[in-house]
């Protein structure tokens, strides 16, 4: 029967919860505390028996019982009297339902440990002999801990030669001179008695000998070749072999039978001890130890016999049963020898007379049939053998109880998909309730493969999916009734790593970044991402920037070798966790190769071998072999060759007459290593040169010479001593060779003809010979200016800005040098300032293209030949005109009003016609304030001399934009534009007799229109008298309306009002006046003078003066009086420790001195609204239609929405009294 949970409020048979150990050793000065406790709600009565007889604690004055407890305390009044309490005790806990008993508690009393008096004589032993120092500690029920020390309390060093046995004796396999000491002391520590006793000191004197004899091993412990050891199951076993001999023997163990492959066998004390922590039955068998040295071996075989105290195989369990049930109580025990099992009922031995029709024993089990309410009891099963005893109490509780569910109702179980969940339903009742789980959507849950039911009421679902989410019901029922609870299963998405960290390869000293993108279920309250390195959590250190963790990223800075490893992203919630791991590989430049060796030396070759260095996690791609020589460029390393990264040897081709040393550089993906240590030097023998110089040239600096030059050979190519150059030359196909020996270039050949071709040879020579003669190269003497000019030069106009120039091919005769190209000179004859321009043409060509010319212009062109000396004579000048182009725009365009329906355009001709002007084209479009109208063609004027045009029958209310284009046969110019209308220029003023009517919050303007003038629009602007700059547009009105009203103003407040009229291009003031509304002015909320800058400055000055006066008084007092040094120091400390609360004393806000702008908030924002709903106050709860000094509104616009004027800004009718332009401008 499984363990169950009982309600706390139910009384049940007694159960022992605490008791003293079965073996209880008592030392002098100790009290005896015999523990016996039962469950609190069993309401039990305790009794004791000693050696089978009733023990009444209250009978002795030294015996006390704890209140509400079965534990007793026997006080130690007299140490010798404690022996009277030695014996075997058992506790009985009884209530109306039965009796439970404790196991037997064997109380053993011991006296204070003492060593018996004995005569200790000094021991004299010959060097190399074996020796045993006996300890023989006092006997005790609990063996003491033995320690060997000297008089200075220093432990005796133990090793292969010197060791202590389990019996406490000290064994010397062979004695050495260093073992001679006068104070070998054996100490015995009795932990329970809290006592350490020591034996008399033993003195050892070692007689030295010059003839130490080696001897084969012999067993010191145990004696003989065989022994039998009894081992108890689940107890430790220790077998030891200590042997003597010279040299010191080595110990080896061989399990002959038993657990030959068990890993739980340990070897301690230099393999002198075989140790098993918990012996098992299969450890039974033979174990052999062998002592071995150079002289032979000795063996000892242990036969281990494993027996056991009683142990449980099937233990009787507590149970609650209903009347009429049949019960079987099992009491199955193991042990060796086989234990004897006895039964007890309520602490009394079960007799044959107790066995009647419904109580019987069957094969070691107690069978109880047809149990009734009065059969409730506590049954004991006890097993004994020579190694111990075993006791179990099991109550049989026969009762009728309705079902109870002990698990909390409405429990929520949260789980992630594809995991398992167990929902509890712990019940109690008699008979044992039947449990059933239900769900609304499922009739029989247990029929589903993923659902399983346990006898303790738990429902387990394996591989949970979203469809399993919902409410589950657990119902417990028996013949006394039924009860149920609900549980809610909350299924969430499993945490996922959607972008795991990837392997990183980072250079040492660089930075590595791991990224890990995680998806959590939104319902998770805990969403944590941790990073680990090699399984250990990484934490950011505020004092170290090695690791930086932000969101889903781990950054590692200044990467070093120690940072290499496996990095794990661990994403965890309160329900699950998932992790992904990636490796960080730290790469670096490879280490330098080493161990360079030279071999197989030849005249011009040698073999180089090396050992690669550590590649630092990046494979070596190649090796660079460099050389240095000490004759021509000592200390400078040159690359000789490169080989693949898997090679460690190569043959090197060398030059003669060089004293080489070599080094090797390894290259990986990071870069090259440092160079290796150089090899030994190797000098190659000299030989004749094998190379001739390159880049040989023959060029003249003047017509009468030729400079022969070449690229000198490097010293490594000289091949021998006394290296020089043999220079030879002759005229091409003429004369004999002339030669000159030179150490370096150049060689100058004089008295030459102009641009004469020569054959030239430059050959390498040294003391051992010459290089092979090279092929001659052709050079020339110096050039002179060409004597010829291009012939038959022709011109062709390609377009309005380009001319093509062509000529015949140039003959070599008279060229006097290498043809470098041509110089084209051209001059414009259409401009006032004639300036010659040049176009350089490279190479041997017969034409050129001149671009960027002016259209319809005359140009003269000349061409000259160029050689290395410069340009020669120019060709005969040729003339050409460029094609026509489009003209430049007309020089100006004006408008003149002819009448209300006609306009005249007046313009000037283009400054650069770029051809023959053919006339003009005119376009127009109507311009509104918000958009542009379509563009219309107006007129084509074919007379290029005409410079005006009149447009009739147009609207006087519209504004027009005119575009004028000049034309040639090629096309139109760019347009020139002008804008205007037929509206008559306004006479200033267009209105007369402006009068003013004022009210508390309104001002009304009245006027008369100027007689004879057309209607015109005028703007009304206003500003507060206190404002000096900014006017605000209040509204617009037509002059024919004769009146305009400004509302929403403040009572008793002065304003400036002006009228503005459009005079074509700009508005001009036509009338202005200062007016004041009637009524009592509302006082603005003023800033307190305490916030004014002048007041702050004044207060600051006063405080500063007071502070100076106080300092002067303090200095005067300090000079004239006495004071306490301590007080003075305290004062200084306090003043220094006092924090500065206001380090900005004397500063001021920028708003104190800056003028207000239209975006600044009001200083009187708390003033309530004035006027009607149609007033300017509609713009916000704090608007008072006052203006700052710069004319901007005071107040925040936070209330009603802005209102549009009734007729719009362009209306000629009356304007709304609420005009948004005041707020918007």
Image (tube, grey):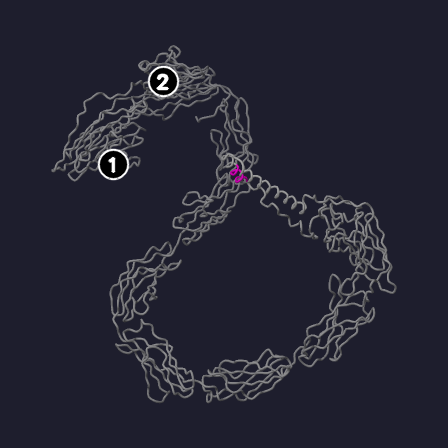
**Which residue is located at x 75 percent, y 52 percent?**
1026
| Residue that extends furthest to the front in the rendered view of this protein | 1120
Quadrant that contains the N terminus: top left
Q: Is residue 1201 left or right of residue 734?
A: right
Give the CA distance from mark 2 to mark 1: 42 Å
Within 10 Å of disc 1 (Cα), the crowding (few <14, some 14-19, many 20+) is some
Return the residue nearer the eye: 306 or 1106. Answer: 1106
* Image position, residue 1219 (x, y; %): 77, 53
Q: Is residue 817 left or right of residue 959?
A: left
* Image position, residue 579 (x, y; %): 46, 44
| Magenta span main SS | helix
Residue at the disc numbered 2? 32
Residue at the disc numbered 1? 270
Q: Secondary structure at mark 2?
A: strand
* Image position, residue 318 (x, y; %): 43, 22
| Residues shaded magenta | 1131-1138
- Using the rendered view, name the quadrant where residue 744 is placed: bottom left
| Residue that extends furthest to the left in the rendered view of this protein | 211
Taking the magenta stretch, the answer to whether it contains residue 71 is no
* Image position, residue 407 (x, y; %): 52, 28
């Amino acid at each position: 029967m499984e363990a169950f949970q009982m309600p706390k409020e139910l009384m049940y048979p007694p159960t022992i919860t605490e008791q003293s150990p079965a073996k209880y050793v008592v030392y002098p000065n100790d009290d005896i505390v015999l523990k016996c406790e039962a469950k609190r709600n069993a309401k039990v009565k305790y009794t004791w028996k000693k050696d089978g007889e009733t023990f009444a604690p209250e009978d002795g004055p030294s015996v006390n019982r704890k209140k509400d407890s079965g534990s007793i305390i026997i006080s130690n009044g007299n140490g010798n009297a404690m022996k009277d309490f030695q014996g075997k005790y058992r506790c009985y806990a009884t209530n109306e339902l039965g009796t439970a008993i404790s196991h037997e508690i064997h109380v053993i009393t011991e006296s204070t440990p003492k060593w018996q008096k004995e005569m200790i004589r000094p021991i004299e032993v010959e060097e190399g002999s074996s020796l045993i120092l006996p300890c023989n500690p006092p006997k005790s029920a609990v063996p003491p801990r033995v320690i060997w020390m000297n008089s200075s309390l220093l432990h005796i060093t133990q090793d292969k030669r010197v060791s202590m046995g389990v019996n406490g004796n000290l064994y010397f396999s062979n004695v050495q001179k260093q073992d001679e000491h006068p104070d070998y002391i054996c100490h015995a520590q009795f932990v329970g008695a809290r006592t350490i006793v020591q034996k008399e000191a033993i003195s050892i004197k070692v007689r030295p000998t010059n003839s130490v004899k080696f001897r084969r091993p012999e067993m010191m412990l145990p004696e003989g070749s065989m022994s039998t050891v009894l081992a108890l199951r689940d107890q430790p076993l220790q077998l030891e072999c200590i042997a003597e001999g010279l040299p010191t023997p080595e110990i080896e163990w061989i399990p002959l039978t038993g657990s030959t492959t068990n890993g739980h066998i340990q070897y301690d004390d230099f393999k002198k001890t075989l140790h098993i922590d918990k012996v098992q039955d299969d450890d039974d068998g033979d174990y052999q130890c062998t002592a071995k040295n150079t002289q032979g071996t000795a063996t000892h075989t242990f036969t281990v016999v494993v027996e056991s105290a009683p142990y449980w195989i099937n233990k009787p369990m507590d149970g609650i049963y209903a009347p009429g049930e049949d019960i079987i109580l099992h009491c199955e025990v193991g042990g060796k020898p086989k234990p004897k099992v006895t039964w007890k009922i309520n602490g009394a031995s079960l007799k044959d007379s107790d066995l009647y029709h419904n109580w019987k024993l069957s094969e070691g089990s107690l069978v109880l049939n047809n149990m009734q309410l009065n059969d409730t009891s506590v049954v004991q099963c006890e097993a004994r053998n020579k190694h111990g005893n075993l006791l179990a109490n099991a109550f049989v509780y026969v009762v009728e109880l309705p079902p109870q569910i002990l698990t909390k109702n409405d429990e929520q179980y949260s789980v992630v998909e594809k995991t398992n969940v167990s929902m509890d339903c712990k019940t109690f009742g008699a008979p044992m309730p039947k449990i059933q789980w239900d769900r609304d959507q499922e009739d029989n849950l247990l029929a589903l493969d993923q659902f399983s039911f346990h006898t303790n009421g738990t429902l387990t679902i394996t591989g949970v999916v979203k469809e399993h989410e919902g409410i589950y019901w657990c119902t417990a029922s028996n013949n006394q009734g039924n009860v149920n609870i609900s549980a809610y299963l909350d299924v969430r998405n499993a945490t996922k790593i959607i972008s795991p960290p990837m392997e990183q390869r980072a250079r040492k000293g660089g930075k590595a970044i791991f990224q890990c993108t995680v998806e959590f279920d939104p319902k998770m309250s805990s969403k944590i991402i941790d990073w680990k390195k090699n399984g250990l959590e990484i934490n950011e250190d505020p004092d170290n920037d090695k690791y930086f963790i932000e969101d889903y990223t781990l950054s590692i800075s200044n990467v070093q070798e120690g940072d290499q490893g496996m990095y794990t992203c661990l994403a965890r919630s309160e329900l699950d966790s998932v992790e992904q791991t990636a490796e960080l590989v730290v790469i670096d430049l490879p280490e330098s190769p080493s161990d360079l060796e030279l071999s197989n030396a030849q005249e011009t070759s040698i073999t180089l071998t090396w050992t690669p260095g550590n590649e630092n996690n990046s494979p070596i791609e190649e090796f660079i072999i460099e050389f240095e020589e000490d004759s021509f460029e000592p200390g400078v390393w040159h690359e000789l060759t490169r080989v693949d990264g898997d090679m460690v040897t190569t043959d090197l081709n060398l030059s003669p007459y060089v004293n080489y040393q070599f080094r090797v550089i390894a290259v990986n993906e990071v870069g090259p290593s440092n160079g290796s240590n150089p090899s030994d030097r190797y000098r190659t023998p000299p030989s004749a040169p094998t190379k001739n110089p390159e880049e040989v040239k023959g060029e003249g600096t003047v017509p009468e010479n030729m400079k022969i030059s070449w690229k000198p050979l490097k010293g490594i190519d000289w091949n021998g001593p006394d290296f020089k150059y043999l220079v030879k030359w002759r005229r091409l196909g003429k004369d004999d060779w002339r030669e000159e020996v030179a150490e370096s270039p150049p060689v100058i050949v004089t008295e030459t003809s102009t641009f004469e071709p020569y054959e030239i040879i430059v050959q390498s020579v040294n003391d051992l010979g010459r290089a092979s003669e090279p092929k001659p190269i052709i050079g020339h003497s110096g050039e002179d200016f060409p004597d010829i000019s291009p012939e038959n030069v022709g011109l062709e106009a390609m377009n309005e800005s380009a001319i093509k120039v062509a000529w015949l091919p140039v003959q070599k005769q008279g060229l006097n040098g290498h043809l470098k190209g041509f110089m084209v000179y051209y001059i414009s004859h259409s401009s006032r300032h004639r300036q010659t321009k040049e176009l350089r043409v490279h190479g041997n060509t017969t034409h050129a293209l001149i671009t960027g010319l002016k259209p319809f212009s005359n140009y003269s062109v000349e061409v000259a030949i160029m050689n290395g000396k410069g340009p020669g004579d120019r060709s005969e000048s040729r003339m050409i005109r460029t094609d026509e182009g489009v003209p430049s725009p007309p020089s100006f365009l004006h408008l003149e009003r002819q009448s209300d329906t006609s306009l005249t355009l007046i313009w000037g001709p283009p400054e650069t016609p770029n051809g023959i002007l053919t006339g003009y084209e005119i376009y127009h479009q109507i311009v509104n304030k918000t958009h542009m109208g379509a563009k219309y063609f107006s007129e084509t004027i074919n007379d290029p001399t005409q410079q005006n045009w009149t447009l009739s029958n147009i609207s006087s209310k519209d504004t027009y934009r005119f575009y004028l284009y000049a034309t040639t046969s090629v096309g139109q110019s760019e347009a020139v534009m002008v804008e205007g209308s037929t509206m008559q220029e306004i006479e200033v003023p267009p209105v007369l007799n402006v009068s003013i009517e004022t009210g508390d919050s309104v001002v009304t303007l009245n006027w008369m229109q100027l007689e004879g003038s057309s209607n015109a629009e005028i703007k009304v602007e206003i500003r507060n008298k206190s404002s000096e700059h900014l006017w605000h547009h209040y509204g617009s009105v037509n002059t024919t309306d004769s009146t305009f009203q400004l509302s929403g103003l403040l009572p008793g407040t002065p304003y400036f009002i002006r009228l503005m009229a459009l005079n074509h291009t700009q508005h001009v003031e036509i009338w202005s006046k200062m007016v004041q509304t009637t009524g009592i002015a509302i006082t603005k909320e003023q800033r307190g003078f305490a916030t004014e800058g002048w007041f702050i400055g004044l207060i600051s000055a006063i405080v500063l003066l007071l502070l100076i006066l106080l300092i002067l008084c303090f200095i005067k007092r300090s000079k004239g009086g006495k004071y306490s040094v301590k007080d003075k120091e305290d004062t200084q400390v306090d003043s220094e420790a006092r924090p500065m609360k206001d380090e900005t004393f004397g500063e001021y806000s920028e708003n104190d001195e800056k003028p207000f702008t239209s975006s600044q908030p009001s200083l009187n924002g708390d003033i309530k609204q004035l006027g009607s709903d149609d007033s300017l106050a509609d713009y916000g709860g704090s608007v008072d239609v006052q203006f700052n000094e710069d004319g901007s509104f005071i107040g925040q616009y936070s209330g009603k929405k802005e209102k549009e004027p009734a007729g719009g800004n362009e209306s000629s009718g009356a304007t709304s009294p609420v005009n948004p332009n005041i707020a918007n401008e």
